[in-house]
Amino acid sequence: MVLQKRLDYGFNGYQVPYTPRATRSARRRSAFKKRGEDNQMCAFDLLATVAGKLLLDKQTPPTSSNASTDENQSAVVKDSENKEKQDENKQLKVETSDQGSWDRGFFVSELVSPAQDQKYSLKESPCNQEDAPLGFASVITTSDCSEGFSDQKLVNGKAKNEMGILASKVEVGPSGYREYGDCKIEVETKKIIKDELHKTGKVQFGTKVDGCSLDDPVVWDGKPPAVVSSDSSPKLPSCRDHSPHSSFPASRDCVNVFSRDDDEKSSGCTHPNTTKKSFRAAPRIGDRRIRKILASKYWKVGPKLKDVTLSNTDGELRTVYRTRNSCYKSIRSERNYPIKKRRLFNYSSVSNYDGGISGEDICVSPKRVMNGDVSGLCSKMHEAAGASSSVAGPHTTFRSRDSHVKLRIKSFRVPELFIEMPETATVGSLKRRVMEAVNAILGGGLRVGVLLQGKKVRDDNKTLLQTGISHDNQLDALGFSLEPNTSQTPPTLCSGDYPFMLSCDTPQPFTRYTSTSGIIQQGTCDVAPELHVTNISNFIESDHDSAPSPTDMSIDNSTKDSKALVTVPAMSVEALAVVPVHRKSKRSEIIQRRIRRPFSVAEVEALVQAVEKLGTGRWRDVKLRAFDNAKHRTYVDLKDKWKTLVHTARISPQQRRGEPVPQELLDRVLTAHAYWSQQQAKQQLKPQP
DNA sequence: GTTAGGG
DNA sequence: CCCTAAC
């Protein structure tokens, strides 16, 4: 079939339109797509957890008035008794569940904002935040020796050369985090101590991240795709075919466009390759598949951040791009491995050494910091492996002179991203992919949850004082979490801000609660977990009727007044992925849209040339001919572009937008379009009589 | 999987 | 660029 089609050359130098190919059932296609969608369900575990740090001054308790309709639970007015209880419980840190999340998380931001300002803002800032104002210096700083993932992992792994052409499967595990975590924490801690000693009134959170590189000069240039024509420039007359019978010059089949930041580094010129025409190019489902995988079912794409505003001065999330090697995630090549299974596999395998997901890990004893036991601290954090990079120092250090409670959120981690790339993908494309994934998350609509002592503070109307987070002993137990926006979560299915939904048929989140002994199982974690099981049962009672009740949860908690505090097991991230499985209604809205990549003039040139030669209606051939190396250009894209080109050529130049296309090209578009339209008409008329 | 066309 | 009917 293919061969036959290829032989259909020869009408005035053009190829005649080929007869429609054999068709396949649309039902098959539908079935195929459906399977794909199902496989995507567990692609994301998107609850990002935030380690928080609290600075406060209780002189003027801020009055929170950010009412939430879906959170009507009564708040808890913390009393001294409760305080004592929690002090005790502090020693029982829960290594709650989800271990797999931390290491695979992204460090997205570093945030400093007044607590009373319930609107959190994330802004990018340079790594060096020495001068960041205290009040509202929210920053996104990947705060790390980023670039580590691709730069190190691939090199250490199976990268073939500096261009990042993977020679074989790349399996990246979350192993690199801990080392860095130590490094980072050490820096942070020292700085905190220093600040305490030298700052007087205004506390500055200077955090210079060593090794932080804003730009990757090697791989990521941040430039738009550069299109390079082939050996014979399409603009050169010599490239044109001599087609005496044609109304316009046809082109040599020598133009091939590729993008520099494309999925593959290319030599730039695809020589006329006859063999290529005999075979279909290897299916590049990678793009789509990744796109679909990244297209989280649970996160709506679009600028709908309400609780968290992400922005920076450049209007782009540049820092997000810089992933830390640790925070990452896994790149998988097991294409035949069901995504759902992959997720579960990851869950179980990584959880053994991952840390918790909640803010528990930031409960670092101030004494240790003050004693200068940085190494011990780091070691501890290292052991925890899920420890937040935000190490809370002595709260007194951060006591502010004004009446505001100041928060410092070191980082947001967006865990559990699945990236699947072709082996031949470049590091640059990998980074881009991760970038897209993170952007999809951040752009999907987030809300912020507040964790106190591992419990979720659900009542938005309570003040910080009332909820008790203004108490000294709570300073290092405050955490934040990024959650899906409630507006996207039908409350009937899930209480929205609940990171996991017990009614879901996927029991993973609770598999660790095999607690007949009152202890949350830590799995095979070789590090003795610190347990903080406070209010686990309370959480279940108050919010989830269908929750499996660990009745043997023996650890008591100040239960009577903690109804507003809901323990959020750290596995909430995984559980997040579970929640939307049954929500199919909005699925179509959640799929991530591809990034827009306007065609360059060179690409247009190549497209026009190919269409002149092949005609309209043979977009796959056009793709193979002129855009075979431009992985991001599908034949549908080319078809669409041609459509818009025709439209553009017909409208007045004043009405045109974007990068101006040379009139010469537009003229050729019209000419070719007219020609091939005529040919199509002829072709249709022929069989009729 | 491709093509064509509407959105 | 997405979606989808139709092929």
Image (cartoon, coloured by chain):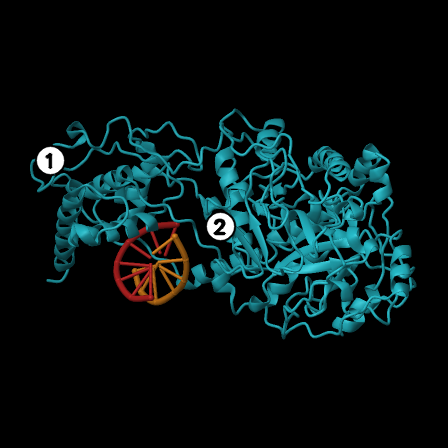
Chain colours: A cyan, B red, C orange
Question: Does residue A10 appear in this view?
Answer: no
Query: Residue at left 67%, top 42%?
Result: A204
Q: Position of residue A14 (x, y in %)?
A: 16, 41
Task: Please name which of the two marks, 2 or 1, marks the residue nearer to the observer.
Answer: 2
Q: Residue A324's spot in the image, x, y percent?
A: 62, 37
Amino acid type, callout 2? Arg
Q: Quadrant of residue A483?
A: bottom right
Q: Residues within 10 Å of mark 1 (few under 14, many from 20)?
A: some
Q: Nearer the viewer, residue A679 or A487?
A: A487
Mark 2–mark 1 Cα distance, whole angstroms, equals 42 Å
Q: Which mark is residue A291?
A: 2
Q: Chain of mark 2?
A: A
Marks 2 and 1 in Cβ contact (< 8 Å): no
- Position of residue A298 in the picture relative to residue A180 (left or right): left
| Left or right of residue A46, residue A431 in this image | left
| Circle 1: residue type | Ser
Q: Quadrant of the C terminus of chain A?
A: bottom left
x and y percentages locating residue A383 in the rendered image: 81, 39
**Residue at the top extreme, as displayed:** A161
Q: Where in the figure is residue A482, as x and y percent of width and height?
A: 64, 56
Q: Quadrant of residue A511?
A: bottom right
Is there any visible trace of residue A407 in the rendered image? yes
SS class, disc 1: loop
- Residue topped by disc 1: A243
Residue in front for this viewpoint, C2 or A656:
A656
Vertical comparison of A179 with A5: above or below: above
Q: Secondary structure at mark 2?
A: helix
Left or right position of A623 against A55: left
